Image (tube, grey):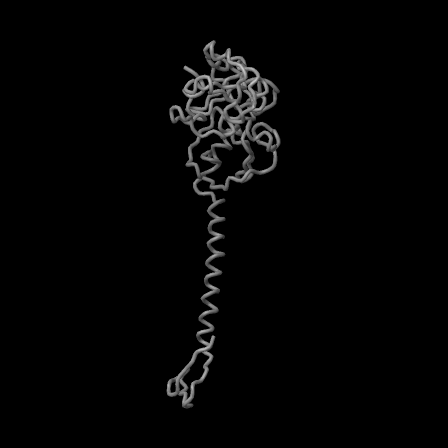
Amino acid sequence: MKLWMLSGCHVNGVRVTDDRFVVVVQENFLVFIFFYHLTLNLYSWLKLLIDHWKSSKISNGRFLVKMAPVKGSCDFCGRPSNPNNDVLYGPIHRMKDIKCHYYCLLFSSNLDQNGRDDEGILGFLLPDIKRELRRAKTVNCSYCRKPGGVTSCHANKCKKRFHLPCGLEKGSLHLFYDDFRSYCGEHRKKQRVPADVLSSRDVNCSICFDPIEDLTSNDSIWAPCCRKNGWFHRLCIQSGQVQRCHAKKWDIHTRPRCFMGA
């Protein structure tokens, strides 16, 4: 950095006596610039460290975690991480030494979301998950007979307890609204669809536009507010690819009136 000075002024306590313009290298100014940029860099690094610390701190049992899917097997159902199954079970997330599918948490009968969305695994707190895992060791799945059957059928007097994947393989139904009830394949709720709607031909899913082969299948859903055009694959809705029902401005993924029938 060059600083042009006139004759007669002082630089670092020394009077400049030459009558012509002189170039004075002001060392103090260079030092100031150096430390200024150094401070900016240190501030940036410190901010990154603080953000990282906030994303993984534990305070009063509340564990804040970045929701990045991870590899490994679910501590509840034992199934390994597989992107192809994320729509069915939800992605596997890690919190400290725990790994679990999000939907395994969501449909665990004795597990509540006691935190905010940015706490734990989308609201499921570390102490609560550990408590449910301890219970899981004492509950055998009604299908595979292995421990971890924490999903219960909500039907009266039904005592079936199962892993989420085991239940789905046996035709279970899981409702993504209100208190997130589950039903085994025997007691799952059936949608009431008018005969004239069931008689429709060449029906396509309103999301993926692929044909729906069997309108009476558990894998298909009819949205009453959309009448004959409101057919969907269940997994297409569960994947979150549809946002709102334009007929009534309902969220089709969370409002039962829009796809469960009256």
Question: What's the residue at 51%, 26% (across, down)?
Answer: 207
Residue 115, relative to residue 147: is it above or below? below
Question: What's the residue at 47%, 20% (across, down)?
Answer: 229
Quadrant of the image for the C terminus? top left
Between 213 and 220, the one nearer to me in the picture: 213
Could you say which quadrant of the image residue 10 lies in?
Answer: bottom left
Residue 238 pos. (x, y %): 51, 27
Between 79 and 260, the one nearer to me in the picture: 260
Total numbered labels placed on residues in the image: 0
Residue 240 pos. (x, y %): 49, 30
Q: Farthest residue toward the front? A: 202
Residue 254 pos. (x, y %): 43, 26
Side (left or right) of 87 relative to 246: right
Could you say which quadrant of the image residue 167 lies in?
Answer: top right
Residue 56 pos. (x, y %): 49, 44
Residue 49, relative to residue 199: is it above or below? below
Residue 55, relative to residue 225: is it above or below? below
Between 149 and 249, the one nearer to me in the picture: 249
